Amino acid sequence: MKVRVKLVQKDLLENKESVIVDTIGLLNSDRLLYKEAETGAKHRVSFSSEGVVLERSAEVSSRSDLKLRQKGESVVSSPYGEMRFETYCRSLEKREDRWQVEYSILQQGEVVSDFILIWYLQMIS
């Protein structure tokens, strides 16, 4: 089903909020697909009660495995190589009109990034 997707990122370390994406996507139960208008990067968000998998396909691609209340991994791949980061997902919520995940990215056990991602979803008829 077609949906309007508005992704808001809250950076908890810098106390900033940004609209990352505002576009049209496809929603199929627990999977959301959309493209970044500016870069053409493809995104796939797979949501379950155990966690969320965030995938971005472009020149610089990434896959983040966010497991609820567990450590996971984020892998960023570019023409220059691959970087791996540890993740920790504190909370997730899935509603009909909104998906939300709160997580940290860690390096050597220290939090280097702390985010809340909120996908606002509006069905298109």
Image: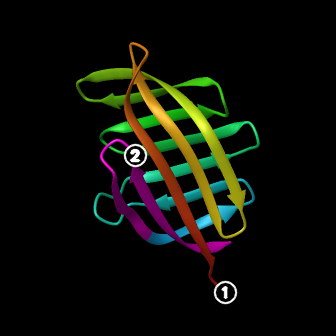
In the image, what residue occupies the spot 72% across and 67% down?
A: 96
Disc number placed over residue 98 in the picture, else none: none
In the image, what residue occupies the spot 43% across and 15% down?
A: 109
**Element on which disc 2 rests:** loop
Q: Which residue is mark 1?
A: 125
Q: Amino acid at mark 1?
A: Ser
Could you say which quadrant of the image residue 100 lies in?
bottom right
Point out the stretch of residues depicted in magenta.
1-22
Residue 63 rendering spot, x and y as whole percentages: 49, 35
Residue 21 rendering spot, x and y as whole percentages: 40, 64
Q: With 94 as the anchor, is 54 left or right in this view?
A: left
Which of the two marks, 1 or 2, is nearer to us in this view? Answer: 2
Q: Nearer the viewer, residue 47 or 43?
A: 47
Q: How is the image coloured?
A: rainbow
**Element on which disc 1 rests:** loop
Does the segment drawn in magenta span residue 66? no
| Magenta highlight: main SS | strand
Q: How many marks?
A: 2
Q: Nearer the viewer, residue 25 or 117?
A: 117
Residue 85 rendering spot, x and y as whole percentages: 42, 23
Could you say which quadrant of the image residue 27 lies in?
bottom right
Q: Which residue is mark 2?
A: 12
Q: Are marks 1 and 2 in contact (CB under 8 Å)?
A: no
Q: With 73 as the anchor, is 83 left or right in this view?
A: left
Q: Nearer the viewer, residue 58 or 62?
A: 62
Could you say which quadrant of the image residue 94 lies in?
bottom right
